Amino acid sequence: MTEKIGVYVCHCGSNIAGVVTVAEVSQWAGEELASEGVVISRDYKFMCSSLGQELIQKDIQEMGLTRVVVAACSPHLHEATFRTACKNAGLNPYLCELVSIREQDSWVHTDKEAATQKAKAIISGGVARVAHHESLEPLRVPIHPDTLVVGGGIAGIQAALEIADAGFHVYLVEKEPSIGGHMAQFDKTFPTLDCSACILTPKMVQVGSHPNITLLTWSEVTKVDGYVGSFAVTINKKARYVNTDTCTGCGICWEKCPKKVRDEVFEVGLGNRKAVYTPFPQAVPKYPVIDAPNCTYFIKGTCKACEKFCPTGAINFEQKDEEITIPVGNIILATGYDLFDAKRIPQYGYGRLENVFTSLEFERLSNAAGPTGGNIVLRDGKTVPKAVAIVHCVGSRDQNYNPYCSSICCMQSLKFAHLVHERTGAEVYNFYIDIRTPSKGYEEFYNRLLEEGTNFVRGKVAEISSVARVPEEQGKLVIQVEDTLIGKQRRIPVDMVILSTGIQARHDAKEVAKMFGISCSADNWYIERHPKLDPIATMTDGIYIAGCVQGPKDIPASVAQGAAAAARVLGKIQQKEISLEPVRATVNQEQCSGCRICNDLCPFNAILFHEETMVSEVNPALCQGCGTCVAGCPAGAISGTGFSNDQILSQINGLLLLRITDQEYA
Amino acid sequence: MTNGNFEPVIIGFTCNWCSYRAADMAGTARMKYAPNVRLIRLMCSGRLDPTFIFKAFAGGADAVLISGCHPGDCHYIDQNYKALRRFHLMKRVLTQMGMEPGRLKLLWASAAEGALFASEINKFVEEVRQLGPLNWQVPGEAVSIPTQKTQVEVTA
């Protein structure tokens, strides 16, 4: 063995040392693995600290180490730290191997002896592997300065504006005819009660007129190719049937359109729109779209009222969907959330009992620009309720539906209670499990509600029914609930029920995640790179997340995350180029038999076959490093950098060292 | 040696994007599982060369775990299907060599499924414990053909 290997075992405070006898492991490695090339083995309290790193660097320089194995946490956490340390000491960073004895050992095992044995085996595997490492140089690829933001809600708007203001180009894609997202549907925002439209629409206008933003509404991403720095994104621009170059947004078309359609998206079914429409008056862009499945012309072949009256001749029934492909360097996903479907809880009667509303319906009901002009009335459109029940945690914190807390519903319910109280003077009951008001100014808002005289009943609502048992309940909705503070069953008759429905991941979150090559949690929220230290990036380089795609959050948090994602993207753009892991496959042309098995295995079409020489070659720009071709080559002609056969086979041997030398098995 | 104090050693192949992260997640959440599995990180389960499995068994492993992304979730589009094919092939080959097919396990685990990863490992360790140590032939000795299982008579 010609390599001089140094082994460094980390205590990680008591995280590793509490279960694994670190000193013993380190001593064992120094003695038993000396035959494998280990010349020094040390343990230290925190290897990742600057003192720990200096320890390694000193040994590299003074002892002339040619390989380093660090036994500490997961490589996904500190691989970069130790590689950089080695690099700074003059050792090629890829000659350092970080093996995990924390996540895979001390944190998951309780038997100290077994955990210590396992740590030895893991280090032995690392030592055997690292001997076969090669000096590598990271691949450097240029970063395209343009960015794609998917989703035009408040998080996406914030991200797009930050990047555009910094002087870089942004494509903002939104599937609805206008940007604004859910925030555009709200009336007031908690806890300050400022008007949602008043703070959102100026930002929307900024997006619409920004020279650095290409706004693509009524469009959807259909395909994503490439990798960080050079993605090629295909976007389907759905036919608007309105020529945006000539349309002035005057609104005559939707005035003249004879076809009324129930607006299931923006007005959540409470109001109507025309077949040619913008979702709301302040829509950005101002151009309407024609809803073809509902348009009389598209159904019957006659009408064309909009075309007849359009002063600029902007209506074009011949328009077709258009596919464009744009190059971008980074992508921010801010696709938001769906509302929990309250019909899934039949005992709450939504969809069956007329005056049971969802939270989004109430938002529209209380919105001055909404279908009732902001009057809080029952579904008949005129009766003002005298008693209103607000049910918290509908679909959230419930093992039968979503186990998580939707985080916004408590404050949203308090806001509803305040609005009902203020506008109707009705008696308001809040049915809650726990009140959660953990942000700035939220607890103060809760106290304000308590003082306003809202009734708070602690208990999960069992049933909402219209069946009266006593004369007072006649014609009312009756809330059946156990008041857990007084320990009694109660029946409370009300006129209106607002279900504070929770939020959940978009119904198509999984498919979208797949398209962008990122992963979802069990609840279909997108998984961040690190739950605490990197809630903005994803496991896939160049793809960032902002807003509710990552998990339920309120407006301030969405805005903060949008801005943070923008900052991360700007940081990347400023670097101009990025280094990629040099994990790539290469074909040894001397050994290649030209069988072409690998050609079909590659999902990225990265393997070319040279007809003249009858051998295959891997295009390193397209290769993603999965290694399937390496495993599939019958001639063993393909080698995978960073994960070569030698490295893995030696690691297997190393991991099994303790079994092989085990007397019982000898 | 009796099965009572037999501690199997299992080599586990994990995918960098899902099951390795599931193992990390199990660690971060301090979920406890049996210490018998020693993991190797690959970039993709598609990298799994059948040689690796032979090597693990030859080196003294009592069982081998292959884990990757759920079908349809592969970071490299569909390479986990190639791992699936190789898994079925290997299972047949190993059976023909006289090995219990239960010594090779395939587990789909996403990055979010730390709990599943931990519980499946516990289950697998228990199954292998029941199978007992792998009595791989000593090199050089003639390979004995495993005796046919007694045929169970089936009445028509």
Image (tube, coloured by chain):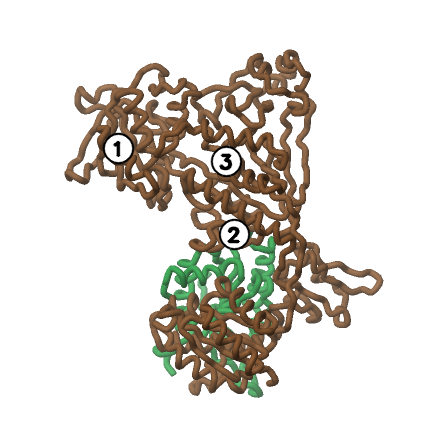
Residue at image mark 2 = A538
Of A265 and B131, nearer the camera is: A265
Under mark 2, the amino acid is: Thr
The image quarter in which residue A102 lies: bottom left
Label 2 or label 1, whichever lies nearer to me, is: 1
Q: Which chain's colour is green? A: B
Q: Viewer-nearest of labels 1 and 3?
A: 1
- Give above or below for A478 relative to A253: below
- Residue at label 3? A153
Q: Amino acid at mark 1?
A: Arg
Disc 2 crowd rating (10 Å Cα; few below 14, some 14-19, many 20+) is: many
Q: Chain of mark 3?
A: A
Q: Which residue is mark 1?
A: A448
- Tint of chain A: brown
First in sequence, mark 1 or 3: give its number.
3
Q: Is residue B113 visible?
A: yes
| SS of the residue under disc 1 | helix
Q: Are marks 2 and 1 in contact (CB under 8 Å)?
A: no
Identify residue type, mark 3.
Answer: Gly
**Which quarter of the rendered picture does the N terminus of chain A lie within?**
bottom right
